[in-house]
Image (spheres, rainbow, N blue to C red):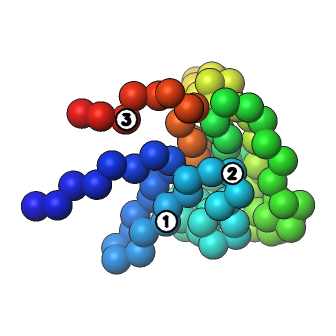
């Protein structure tokens, strides 16, 4: 069995794997998993690490066109926002890039 250490957001579906090491890697393709969820999510909360980073406007527009709002925050605040949304019974998902210095070992 092979194990890998991932320093960043990782999602897998079937044979497809999406690796996001920094906010610069976030694209329409890397967010495709979130568009496939059922029931469809209302809001995607993205945590971009230690600080809030600006995503390319086209990526945000494409998600809005799919009916998904995107909230971009630093990762600690994104976690809190996701927890709040789910406590309010909102259909939400989160994509979280760990802040620098976060322990990634087992």
Looking at the image, is mark 3 or mark 1 nearer the viewer? 3
Residue 1 is situated, as x and y percent measured from the top left of the image, at: 10, 61
Asked whether, in this view, residue 33 is left or right of residue 31, the answer is: left
Label 2 neighbourhood size at 10 Å, few (<14), some (14-19), many (20+)? many
Left/right of residue 66 with respect to residue 81 in the rendered view: right
How crowded pointer 1 is (Cα within 10 Å; few <14, some 14-19, many 20+) is rated as some
Sequence order check, earlier mark of 3 and 1:
1
Q: Where on the picture, by quarter, is residue 12?
A: bottom left
Horizontal arrangement in the rendering, residue 103 relative to residue 33 (left or right)? left
From where the camera sits, is residue 30 visible?
Answer: yes
Q: Is 81 drawn above or below residue 54 in the view shown? A: above
Q: Name the residue that disc number 2 marks.
A: 23
Residue 71 occupies quadrant: top right
Question: In this figure, which residue is indicated by the disc labeled 3?
Answer: 104
- Residue at point 34%, 73% (across, down): 14
Q: Which mark is residue 18?
A: 1
Q: Are marks 3 and 1 in contact (CB under 8 Å)?
A: no
What residue do we see at 51% from left, 50% from top? 9
The residue mark sitting in front, 2 or 1, is 2
Q: Which mark is residue 80?
A: none
Cα gap from disc 3 to disc 1, whole angstroms: 18 Å
Secondary structure of the residue carrying numbered label 3? loop
Instruction: Determine whether 89 is above or below 20 in the image.
Output: above
């Amino acid at each position: 069995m092979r194990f890998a250490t991932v320093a960043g957001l990782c999602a897998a579906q079937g044979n497809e794997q999406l690796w996001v090491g920094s906010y610069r890697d976030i694209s329409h393709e890397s967010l495709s998993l979130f568009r496939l969820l059922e029931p469809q999510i209302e809001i995607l909360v993205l945590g971009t690490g230690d600080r809030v980073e600006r995503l390319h406007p086209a990526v945000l527009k494409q998600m809005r066109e799919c009916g998904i709002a995107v909230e971009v925050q630093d990762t600690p605040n994104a976690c809190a926002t996701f927890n709040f949304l789910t406590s309010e019974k909102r259909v939400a998902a989160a994509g979280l890039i760990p802040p620098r210095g976060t322990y990634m070992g087992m």
